Image (cartoon, rainbow, N blue to C red):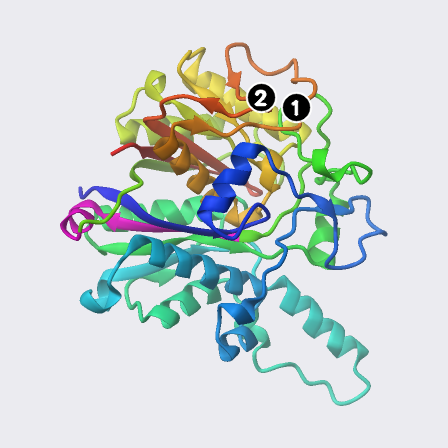
Amino acid sequence: MKRVVVTGMGTINPLGDSVGVFWENALKGVNNTAIVSKFDASRFRTQVASEVTGFDPQKYLDRNEVKRTDLFTQYALYSASRALEDSGLDLQAMDPFDIGVIWGVGQGGMETFESEVENYVKGDYAPRFSPFFIPKLLLNMASGMISMKFGLQGINYAPVSACATSNTALMDAFNYIRLGKAKAFITGGSEAPITPASFGGFAAMKAMSGRNDDPKTASRPFDRDRDGFVMAEGAGALILEEYEHAKARGAKIYAEVVGAAMTADAYHMTSPHPEGLGAAKAMGWALEEAQVNASDLDYLNLHATSTPAGDIAELNAVAKVFGGSKNLWVSSTKSMTGHLLGAAGAVEAILSIKSITDNVIPASINIENLDPEIPEGIQVAVNQPKEKTVNVAMSNAFGFGGHNSTVVFKKV
């Protein structure tokens, strides 16, 4: 099996439009959650979200790209461009069939869908949908548009596994490179879900926080009084590259991808298994593939979204796999970013990798009263980042439908 490394990263999310700004704000404990500005959310139980602010796609994309794409694809194109720049890959010197794109999206073009249907319903003339309606809507259009923008002709598709999606994309890219099917991939995920229907649907499920009077503290994983997640938007992109190829061109290497696994809970449409059985198996398999002992894992970026049941279920799984390991520290950076749904895994992979390069564990903020049900021995980085040598980091991402996905990164 070939080795796989990370040679480029890019992002746009509520904490920043570059990896540097994102990382700096994460270490400062910045949280930009506020009352929704994209539409009037006053009729919903939840009225807060973590939005990307100041993004003008016309500054980064040509007119036709903007006209033909939904916001989730625009986020994808932006972050993929930044990751490619960061990697220093010379695309002209490579066979275009050696570079693929595997890009995850959970919902697709919700903004496009809602606006087109609304225009149809309100129309007082012969109904006419935009010819770009379906292309803008499709979940695979981000991967397709990235390949077209850069002329990449290798493996190209879009996996979908709800909020586990971009971890699934990373895992697939990792495996294709290991098998010799590609030299490099642009991989990650994007999401633009802050629209009336998407937001309202989650609000109706009572899955999101109702802390409308204090938005910045709404996302509070592991806190005793957490009441739901905070919806967020954006994208995260990573360049995965075959190690020898990266080494030969003198690339900077952030970390090595050493293990990944997926399982299913087979339990409930939206709730995780309360004992975390599927999550525990995914983490165990990923460690086994990485050839890393549980006692050697330094940092685990948890999926923990700030829901009452989900956080504890995941920590129960962690206790099964890691016991009372004194080496392991955990945190949930969704306390700062909010939950980017299908893009969450990619954005959190970036933070996990930065923890390795900088030897700092980002904190879980907004913890006022640590949940007493947290299994004994689990060390949570509470409210302040922790300086610690990080040689191995793991990132979890779980999704509705019972999807569990785990990726392991190692210092090179």
Residue 367: assigned label: 1
Q: Viewed as shown, does residue 23 lie left or right of 304?
A: left
Decide whether residue 278 is among the magenta residues: no
Q: Mark 2 vs mark 1: which is more N-terminal?
A: 1
Q: Residue at x 38, y 55 (%)?
A: 83
Up-down relation of residue 238 to residue 359 (above or below): below
Mark 1: give few (<14), some (14-19) or many (20+) Cα within 10 Å: many
The answer, for residue 285, to whether it is visible in the render is no
| Secondary-structure class at tag 2 | loop
Name the foreground residue: 85 vs 375.
85
Q: Is residue 109 left or right of residue 256?
A: right
Along the line of sight, the residue nearer the viewer: 165 or 81: 81
Residue 336 position, x and y percent, is 60, 37
**Location of the C terminus (image quadrant):** top left
Query: What residue type is disc 1 on?
Result: Ile
Please provide the residue range marked out in magenta: 235-249
Distance from the alpha carbon under mark 2 to that under mark 1? 7 Å
